Amino acid sequence: MFSFSNRASRLIPSRLVPQTCTVFLSAALFASAGLSSLAQSGSQPQSSSSSSSQPSEETTERPKIAPRIAQPEAGGSAVTLETNEPLFDLAVALNACGYDADLEHSIPVRLEIREEVNTALTASADARDHRDALCNYIRLHNMTDSGLNLGQYISLALYLNPPPQLTPTVEETELPPDSTQVVNILPLLRTFGEDVHLHALWVEHRPEYEAAVGKVHDSLTKMILATNVYLRLPVSSYDGRRFLVLMEPMLAPSATNARIYGNDYIVVGSPAAVPEDANPATAVHMDDIRHTYLHYEVEPLIYARASAMDRLLPLLKAVQDAPLDFTYKSDIAAFLTECLIKAVEAQTMDVGIARPKRPTQVKQRADLERYDAEMTEYNRQAEAVRRKSVDLSKRQGWVLVDYFYAKLGQMERDGVSLKDDIGEMVYGMDVDRQRHDAEQVAFLPQGTHDLVRRGPRQLSGLDLAEMKLMKGDLDGATSLARTALSDPAADHAEAHYVIARANLMQRQPEEAQVNFEATLKLSKDPRTLAWSHIYLGRLYDVQSEREKAVEEYRAALTVRDSRPDTKAAAEQGLKQPFAAPNVQHQEQDDNAPLDPSGKAEKDAYRPPSQH
C-alpha cells in the first residue's frame, strides 16, 4: 500500500515545512495467479520535496529541488500521490481573481482559505493593490479554452522551487511551452503570497489537505493494483519514469488535468465534497486517473516496438476522415496506444449490472445450475454493454479498438501478461484486413479528445545537436557532440556521427572518415551503421577509390536497416559512383562544401526521434 506521513503542523518553522505531502506505492510481485503481495515501503525519498524526512534543526533554507518535482531516490516508488505548495499558491491566486469553477462541489477547505485571504486583503490597501495587479495579469493572459487556461498555470507550478523563492527549477527554455506564457506572473505571485501569508495558510490547512489525500489513497491504490493485475504487470519501482497524482482542493473538482512531460506522467485533480457514507472513489474522477495510468503502462510497450510501426502506417490512411486530433492521424504509435488503452477500458469497464453471487452453501444441484444460468445471462448482458462501447469507439475513429479488445480477451483466457503478448498483437496484425475493416466504418461527425496533454519534448544534448545540424548550425552541433564525448555516460557513437556529418559539410573529408569509422566501431543502431557505411562509400567515390566504395555500400545493405531510403541509397551507390553535386563548380568557388551527403536523400540528416 501507500505509506503516508503526517508530520506537518503549524508548530513547524515555516522555512522548514516540506514542499509536498507525498504517499508512495512500493514495488509489488506477481505470482502466477496474479498479484501476490504489496508491502509498505520502508524507505522514503530524501529530497526536500517530500514530507517523508524530518526537518533538520540545522537547516536554514530549503535546498533547490531538482527540475522534476518530488523526485525519489533510485529504487523508491514510481507511483506517488502528492500535494504541492507552488500549485497551492497559484490556485489560491486564481481563486482570489475570480476563479469560482465548481465552487459549490468543493470540499470546505476551499471556502475557508478564500475567506482567510479576503480577510487579509480587507486589512491592507497595499495587499489589495498587489492583488489587483496580479488579477490584471491573469485577465490579460486568459484563454478561451478553460482547460488550456488552467493548464498553463499548472504547468508552471510543477517546475517551481517552493516558497519563498517561487522561481523556476530549470532555465526558461526548458519549461513546458504553455507555462512560458505566464512565467512573468511569478514576481506578482511572490508579493501576493507575502501580503496574505500564503505559506502560513498552507501550514495551517495541511491537516485538511492530508485528510483529502487520505480519502483518495485507498481508491487509488485499488485502481493501480486492479489495473496491474488485469495486465499482469508488476507495479514498478522508480526507474526514471514517474506516475504522479497531485491533489489540489483549490481547483474545480469537475475537471481533471493530465499531462506527460518527458518521463513524468502527471494527473492534477481536486476532491469533491461527498457524503460520509459515499464511496470515496467518487470524490475524484478515477476513470481519468486510470486512463493516464494506462498511458504510463502501455506507452513503453508500444514504443519499444517502433521498428514494427512502419508496416502499420497504411492504417492511418483509413482514419483521415475520422473525428480525431491530428496527432492520431499522423503518429501511428500514438494511435495504437490510444486504441489499446480504450480496449483495456472496455474489457474492464463497470457494466452497471449486478454480478450474481455464488451460493455459499449448496444444498441441491439445482442451486449450482441456477447460479450457472444467472452467470451466463450476466456475461451475455455484460458483453453487450462492452460491445456497445467498442462500437462507439470505432465510430469515433479508434478503429483498432475492436481488434485489441479481442486480443485482450484471448490474453486473459491464456493467462499471459500484456508485456508478453504485445509483440504478437503488433507484429501479428493483419494490416490489410484491419485497414479494409476500418474503411467500412461510418464515422461520427464528432469524436472524443484524449484527456492527456503531452508537452513538446525539450531537446538537449545530442538531440539538440541533431537539430542544430539540420538547421545548419555546424559549430553548435559539433560543440554539443564534443561535450557528449567527454561524458562517459553519453552516446559516443551518435556524437561521432554528428561530428562526421558536420565535417562533411565543412569540407573536412579526412576528419569525417575518422569519425564515421569511430561510429561504426561503437554504434549498435542499424540506421546509424547503414548510413555511416553509405557516407564512407560516397567519400571513397569522391576520392576515386571505387572498390572501397562498393564494399561500404554492400556493408550498408547487410546492416538491414528497414527504411526504404537506406536501401535505395546503397543500391544506387552500387550501380554507379557517387559524384558530389558541387564538384564541377569547385574551381569557381573554393568555399563550396564537399557534400557526399546527397541532398536528394531527405533523411540524410535525420532529426532526433520524438519517442
Image (cartoon, grey):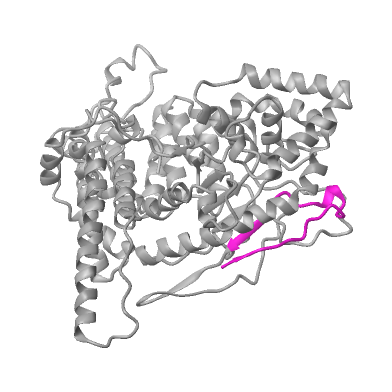
Task: Say which residue appears at 74% left-offset and 43% top-offset.
Answer: 162
What residue appears at the point 39 percent right and 67 percent down from the top-left corner? 229
Give the answer, above or below, for where 215 lies relative to 312.
below
Magenta segment's dominant SS is loop
Splitting the image into 4 quarters, where does residue 511 fall?
top left
Residue found farthest to the top: 588
Asked whether the viewer can see residue 21, the reply is no
The question of residue 419 being in magenta is answered with no
Q: Residue 274 at x, y = what percent? A: 57, 50
Report the number of discs. Answer: 0
The one of 226 and 173 positioned closer to us in this rendering = 226
Q: Quadrant of residue 143?
A: top right
For the N terminus, give its image quadrant. Answer: bottom right
Q: Nearer the viewer, residue 160 or 353?
A: 353
Q: At which x and y percent is residue 103?
A: 62, 35
Q: Is residue 10 magenta?
A: yes
- In the image, taking residue 200 as reference, residue 269 lies left or right, namely left
The percent position of residue 120, horizontal first and vertical second, equals: 84, 31
Residue 431 shown left or right of residue 541 in the figure: left
The answer to whether 439 appears left or right of 320 in the picture is left
Please identify the quadrant where the C terminus is shown.
Answer: top left
| Residue numbers of the magenta segment | 1-24
Relative height, residue 377 to residue 318 (above, below) = below
Q: In the image, what residue occupies the spot 76% across and 19% down?
A: 132
